[in-house]
């Protein structure tokens, strides 16, 4: 079923909130299936049939994160790469491809997927939204808000913890070494080990990191991620509905937000999601350079829309039929808004679409994105935008 995409600055509390949401959803699902069972037993009693089988819970719940996929923080670190390789950042792309694969594997109308992670690239969130749409299921974005200072303090506390842990490990190793040198006389070493642990607990408590085992980000990596963060925009289809949780939100407020999320994905507020033509997935274009073909095909769609408007002699609205390319049989339809769509607007939308699909998000190898899929996706994107404008 639905996809819940977390987004936020590094160390801003995303995993904490994702875990809370998971617990909340598990309860809701259990309650839902209990009441469904009760209802079915009630009706069965009416009909005299009491041998009802227990029903399956309505939804399955999955939490996917960098941690569950063993993706290290270093994949986001551009400083480790030579300048020319930065824009391509291969490790990060690989990480995204594996996240994408993990989501795609479980996403269905019965599976609620919580994707806990930075999800800081707008084009990436767009792809995830399309993936959910293709599975006829809603997607929502949960932005975890927190001041940069606070998030930085969390990372710094984690760095300190790692540092003192390292120190302790070297100290203990050195002591062990000395103990061996002096013929096994190391009466305090056992006690020191415990003391080390105690000290660690104390430090964690002081930093508010009890029970926290997450790795820190290297300071440069952290700064850079904050700099690269692309804030969700609720005006766009792929970032909406957008829910926001801030650090200070107490249990009560958090529950209200979670109620809203449940409503959007499983309750009254749930919209019917039809996979539309914007859901084509990306693949390497085999007949030539991917970007070149993307450019050419979207230009072609723009040309036909302008052509038809001209033929229509100033008439506005209506629809434009465009062949899907490929086998030449299928047709795509652009539903024009009730006003004239000019070249500048079309070019702007085209550039935005190309920007979202230009690569750099590591999905070139996933799915199938041929000429016809490109046209479909662009037509779907245009329809989405025109509909939103009206
Ligand atoms: P992220 O997943 O964004 O890196 P985490 O969820 O791991 O961040 O949170 C970082 C630290 O901040 C954890 O130690 C967590 O206990 C603490 N924390 C997160 N959110 C809150 C909050 N709302 N109030 C208090 N502490 C929080
Ligand atoms: Mg996390």
Image (spheres, rainbow, N blue to C red):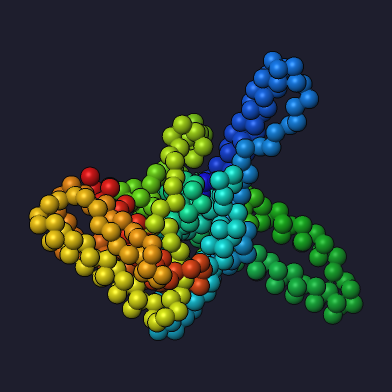
For this orientation, the residue located farthest to the left is 314
Which sits in the foreground, 208 or 170?
Answer: 208
Residue 310, x across and y down, in percent: 12, 61
Taking the spot 70% from the left edge, 69% from the top edge, the residue there is 169
Residue 220, x across and y down, in percent: 44, 70
Which sits in the foreground, 237 or 287?
Answer: 287
Residue 204, x across and y down, in percent: 61, 52
| Residue 114 shows in this picture | yes
Taking the spot 17% from the left edge, 64% from the top edge, the residue there is 307
- For residue 326, which quarter of the picture? bottom left
Quarter that holds the C terminus = top left
Left or right: residue 231 compared with residue 116: left
In this rendering, is residue 303 above or below 116? below
Left or right: residue 304 compared with residue 196: left
Taking the spot 46% from the left edge, 75% from the top edge, the residue there is 284
Which sits in the foreground, 229 or 221?
Answer: 229
């Amino acid at each position: 079923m639905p996809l819940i995409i977390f987004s936020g600055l590094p160390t801003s509390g995303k995993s904490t909130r994702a875990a809370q949401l998971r617990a909340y959803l598990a309860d809701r699902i259990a309650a839902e299936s209990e009441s469904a069972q009760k209802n079915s037993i009630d009706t069965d009693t009416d009909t005299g049939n009491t041998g009802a089988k227990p029903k399956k819970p309505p939804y399955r719940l999955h939490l996917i994160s960098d941690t569950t996929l063993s993706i290290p923080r270093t994949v986001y670190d551009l400083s480790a790469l030579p300048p020319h390789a930065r824009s391509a950042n291969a490790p990060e792309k690989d990480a995204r491809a594996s996240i994408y694969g993990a989501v795609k594997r479980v996403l269905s109308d019965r599976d609620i997927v919580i994707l806990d992670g930075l999800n800081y690239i707008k084009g990436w969130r767009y792809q995830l939204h399309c993936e959910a749409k293709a599975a006829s299921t809603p997607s929502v974005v949960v932005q975890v808000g927190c001041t940069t200072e606070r998030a930085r303090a969390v990372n710094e506390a984690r760095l300190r913890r790692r540092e003192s842990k390292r120190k302790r490990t070297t100290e203990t190793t050195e002591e062990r070494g000395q103990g061996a040198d002096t013929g096994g006389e190391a009466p305090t070493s056992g006690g020191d080990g415990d003391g080390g642990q105690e000290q660690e607990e104390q430090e964690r408590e002081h930093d508010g990191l009890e029970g926290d085992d997450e790795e820190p980000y290297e300071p440069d990596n952290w700064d850079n991620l904050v700099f690269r963060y692309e804030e969700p925009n609720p005006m766009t289809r792929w970032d909406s509905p957008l829910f926001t949780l801030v650090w200070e939100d107490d249990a009560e407020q958090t529950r209200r937000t979670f109620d809203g999320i449940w409503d959007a994905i499983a309750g009254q507020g749930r919209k019917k999601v039809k996979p539309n033509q914007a859901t084509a997935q990306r693949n390497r274009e085999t007949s030539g350079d991917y970007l070149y073909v993307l450019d050419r095909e979207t230009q072609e769609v723009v040309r036909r829309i302008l052509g038809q408007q001209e033929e229509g002699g100033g008439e506005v609205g209506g629809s434009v039929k465009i062949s899907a390319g490929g086998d030449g049989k299928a047709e795509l339809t652009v539903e024009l808004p009730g006003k004239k769509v000019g070249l500048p607007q079309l070019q702007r939308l085209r550039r935005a679409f190309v920007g979202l699909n230009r690569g750099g998000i590591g999905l070139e190898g996933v799915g199938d994105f041929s000429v016809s899929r490109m046209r479909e996706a662009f037509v779907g994107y245009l329809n989405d935008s025109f509909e939103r404008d009206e």
